[in-house]
Amino acid sequence: GAVVSQHPSWVICKSGTSVKIECRSLDFQATTMFWYRQFPKQSLMLMATSNEGSKATYEQGVEKDKFLINHASLTLSTLTVTSAHPEDSSFYICSALAGGLEQYFGPGTRLTVT
Amino acid sequence: KNEVEQSPQNLTAQEGEFITINCSYSVGISALHWLQQHPGGGIVSLFMLSSGKKKHGRLIATINIQEKHSSLHITASHPRDSAVYICAAQFGNEKLTFGTGTRLTIIP
């Protein structure tokens, strides 16, 4: 079946630094990918929709200058958390649309900002 | 407003029991997804359905469009089924609206 990978699986960074998270569709092309964040014991919240070759669409309340999304190819989208703060610590998950309505989720990246 | 509600929030059962998790949504949808999230955090897509019923192994998902309701059933439950089960609805576009999840614990 379709596989989506994320890298890294976990990362610890210092406050003020930037962190890049990669989301790859391994065996299919994805013109659309989604980025979610999940706080402990809460459900997933959509941050942005990433479209290959165009600017990402951010959900209300998500700072586009802080969470930079690049979808440069049909198999790779990246999320960069810029000037990270402790409140950005969360679990970040991507999903990729494999044609139609089928979405495949990545394993997630746990970010801890100290 | 597009809303998705799940019940129960938490469910503990003995190994072998038949499990049912329910999901209701507020308006018409294009598809309903059932997802499984293990303690490590990774999410697995179990089912996507827009009508009727789907079965995969011991898992069965049903949806009633008229009643705006879906159920996920697990037969002969096993401790390895312990996870958070999440339903998510697609309301006409590609975005998903997620339920709050059901934490299932199966006791040996």
Image (spheres, rainbow, N blue to C red):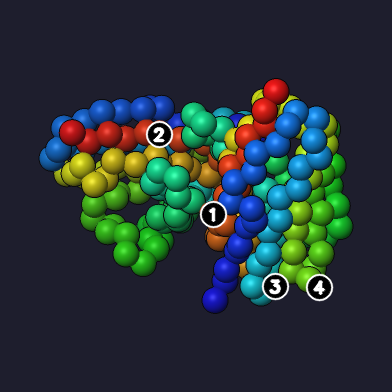
The residue most toward the top is B108
Q: Is residue B28 above or below residue A34?
A: below
Q: Is residue A107 above or below residue B27?
A: above
- The residue carrying mark 1 is B100
Between marks 2 and 3, how big is the CA–CA gap? 33 Å
Between marks 4 and 2, how big is the CA–CA gap? 38 Å
Front one among A41 and A35: A41
Q: Amino acid at mark 2?
A: Thr
Looking at the rendered structure, the secondary structure element under dot 4 is: loop
Q: Quadrant of the C terminus of chain B?
A: top right
Badge 1 density bin: few <14, some 14–19, many ≥20, Cα 10 Å: many
Point 73% across, 45% down: residue: B47
Looking at the rendered structure, the secondary structure element under dot 3 is: loop
Q: Amino acid at mark 1?
A: Thr
- The residue carrying mark 3 is B28
Q: Nearer the viewer, mark 4 or mark 2?
A: 4
The answer to whether residue A45 is left or right of residue A105 is: left
Q: Using the rendered image of the protein, determine whether residue A10 is visible from the camera's viewpoint.
A: yes
The answer to whether residue A81 is left or right of residue B37 is: left
Point 27% across, 59% down: residue: A63
Which numbered tag is attached to residue A46? none
Query: Disc 2: which chain?
Result: A
Q: Are marks 4 and 2 in contact (CB under 8 Å)?
A: no
Q: Nearer the viewer, mark 3 or mark 1?
A: 1
Locate residue A85, reporting x and y percent. Answer: 18, 44
Q: Amino acid at mark 4?
A: Gln
- The residue carrying mark 2 is A109
- The residue carrying mark 4 is B66
Q: Is residue B86 above or below residue B79?
A: below
